[in-house]
Image (spheres, rainbow, N blue to C red):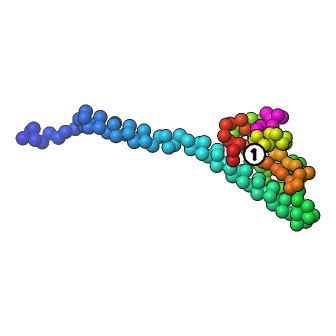
Amino acid sequence: MRRTSMMRRGFTLIELIAVVVILAILAGVALPRYFDYAAQAKSAATKGTLGGCRAGIANYLANEVITNGTALYPTLVQLETLGTVMQEAIPDNPYDTGANPNTVNLATVAEATARTVPVLSGTGGWAYYVDNALTPPAYTFYANTNTTGENDF
């Protein structure tokens, strides 16, 4: 009677190994999905900022056409002046780890075409090219970063 009343008080080694194997399989499937969340967040933040700035620049162009009858994009000074193009300061470039991640640098036509970092970089942030002398005028606004593939937004 004493033998039948004794209950098992723990798990067998086989049961413990089975649980560890199942947890390892679940971790192997789930962990890779979480690793690139930081990269996705940076990409989404960059795309959001670029979309907002490009919309503000397009809005400025439309207002210039309606008001003055001339298609002009904003200059760098106008872009950086709050209330002229943007109602709030341009957000930080998430890929920039420098001291000034929200600075806008003026790019040359060659840099804008190649979407490369301006020669006067080091201040980070964003790059802006504008040429109102062309017909039609042209502009480019992109992330000022050396991170491969991140200027392709």
Q: Is residue 81 visible?
A: no
Figure quadrant of residue 64:
bottom right
Q: Position of residue 23 (x, y in %)?
A: 37, 39
Q: Which residue is at the front of the view, 61 or 38?
A: 61
Q: Nearer the viewer, residue 146 or 138?
A: 138
Q: Which residue is located at x 75 percent, y 41 percent?
A: 115
- Identified at 14% across, 39% down, the residue is 6
Q: Position of residue 32 (x, y in %)?
A: 49, 40
Q: Which residue corresponds to the image point at 71% horizontal and 35% vertical from the top-left?
A: 146
Magenta-colored stretch includes residue 117: yes
Amino acid type, callout 1: Tyr
Magenta span contains residue 152: no
Asked if residue 130 is positioned above or below residue 119 in the image, the reply reads below
- What residue would you read off at disc 1? 142
- Residue closest to the far left: 1
Give residue 33's position: percent from left, percent from top. Answer: 50, 43
The answer to whether residue 25 is left or right of residue 111 is left
Give the quadrant of the N terminus: top left
Does 3 sit above or below residue 63? above
Q: Quadrant of residue 36?
A: top right
Q: Relative to 118, say whether 87 is above or below.
A: below
Q: Quick check: 116 above or below 86?
A: above
Q: Is residue 36 left or right of residue 147?
A: left
State the residue in front, 69 or 25.
69
Secondary structure mostly seen in the magenta stretch = loop
Residue 31 seen in the current view: yes
Decide: few, some or many residues near mark 1? Use Cα within 10 Å; few <14, some 14-19, many ≥20. Answer: many
Residues rendered magenta in the picture: 116-125
146 lies left or right of 82: left
Q: Residue furthest front?
A: 135
